[in-house]
Image (cartoon, helix red, strand yellow):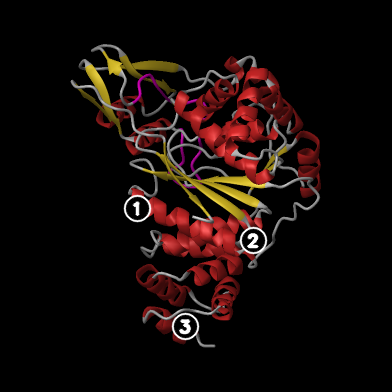
Amino acid sequence: MRTVDLITKKRDGGELTEAEIRYLIQGYTDGSIPDYQMSALAMAIFFRGMTPEERASLTMAMVDSGETIDLGGIAGVKVDKHSTGGVGDTTTLVLAPLVASVGVPVAKMSGRGLGHTGGTIDKLESIPGFHVEIGSDEFIELVNRNGLAVIGQSDRLTPADKKLYGLRDVTGTVNSIPLIASSIMSKKIASGADAIVLDVKTGDGAFMKEMSEAEELAACMVDIGSRVGRKTVAVLSDMSQPLGNAIGNALEVKEAIDTLRGRGPADLTELCLTLGSHMAVLAGVATDREEARVMLERAIESGEALEKFKAFLTAQGGDASVVDEPERLPAAKRLIEVPARESGYVAAIAAERMGLAAMLLGAGRATKESRIDLAVGIVLRKKIGDPVQAGEPLATVHANEIGAEEAIARIYEAITVRPEPVRPPALVVGEVHADA
């Protein structure tokens, strides 16, 4: 095969075979195909798209470009959850112990954040002593013992995807749905999942800001999962405003603990119950989502979910006393109220601007080398649809050394107050199933 012929084939709208796609991915991974040729191919895919068969072949070629994790030593159906990202997205911290408490094994591979706030591991590392540096044998043993463990992402998984994403990032080809779908699904499959629940965000704070794009991405990922033998469900959820109230690492841990106690924000609680119900059904511990939801609600009410979280923290070196004494979490030196300038109703909270405001405080990374301040962030005091009086706090800024004034300015830019009542946006806006 000649790479230039395959680039031309895709440029002209042709369909690449599985063998041709494997040749391209293997060649790019081992360096025999240079960046400039893969750039041309990525641009051809950007404009021409890929067929369902091509997307599945690309996904599995990237899976096979590196190591895979064998979770066969863990009893039960392993269900993974992936979110396409957003602002205040604390779902994993709640979902993992919640579904584990009803018998769904959670063997989670997570990463650090780049952007608005930290990733799941950054958030967990705001708990004193918690660590993810555990070997694969211990990882499997912990899941079998406690039903839950979290490990850091390995650079040896899907190296082709990592290399290709870096290229797409500098060639204007990130926003290609076939390439996004294959990238996400390759990591989930390589991580050993038997089934996958996808939380595809849409709205101002999401990667896919338009509903039509989010629906297309969800359908692509569910189709890939089905074609490669993984039961896959996608939930489309709103990210026109931040999820929950907390934006920032230790603040989100506290909010997760509150949610596991049954005292969390309504939207975060509802999304976790929705995603968790799908996970429980795919794992076979519930016959339908109604039964699953009842099981999950009972696990919160009885305290089982919170006890599972404590056991998980202890098993990975974390100080589980933070669950009952959240003041032991990192705390900012300054708490600054952001008062409303006028009375009315909150009409909009631009999630992306709120995320950037938290990043200015040090809650996120501008580059991979940036250091995160785990204590800082923002806690919303109002959500869309809430009434507010002039002088009443819209948000509380948790700040240390940097960014407070600029963050407050961004918060005012992000929050719109209008005189007339506003209907809150729907949280779950759609679902995609393999048989749809």
Look at the numbered disc 2 and give the secondary structure of its residue. loop
> Which circle's residue, 3 or 1, is located before the other in the chain?
3
Direction from residue 286 to residue 395 in the image, left or right: left
Residue beneath the point at 41% across and 56% down: 216
Instruction: Please state the horizontal and vertical placement of residue 205, each as a whole percent of the image.
Output: 37, 40
Q: Which residue is mark 1?
A: 212
Image quadrant where one finds the N terminus = bottom right
Q: Is residue 359 visible?
A: yes
**Does the CB distance between marks 2 and 1 fall below 8 Å?**
no
Q: Which residue is mark 2?
A: 229
372 magenta-colored = yes
Image: magenta residue range: 363-383
Question: Magenta stretch mostly in which secondary structure?
Answer: loop
Residue beneath the point at 60% across and 23% down: 260
Q: Amino acid at mark 1?
A: Ser
| Mark pair 3, 2: CA separation | 28 Å
**Does the CB distance between marks 3 and 2 fall below 8 Å?**
no
> Which circle's residue, 2 or 1, is located before the other in the chain?
1
Q: Nearer the viewer, mark 3 or mark 2?
A: 2
Q: Residues within 10 Å of mark 3 (few under 14, many from 20)?
A: many
**241 to 113, vertically: above or below:** above
| Mark pair 3, 1: CA separation | 30 Å
Direction from residue 208 to residue 77 in the image, left or right: right
Q: Amino acid at mark 2?
A: Gly
Look at the numbered disc 1 and give the secondary structure of its residue. helix
Q: Amino acid at mark 3?
A: Leu
**73 to 334, vertically: above or below:** below
Residue beneath the point at 39% across and 38% down: 239
179 or 213: nearer the viewer: 213
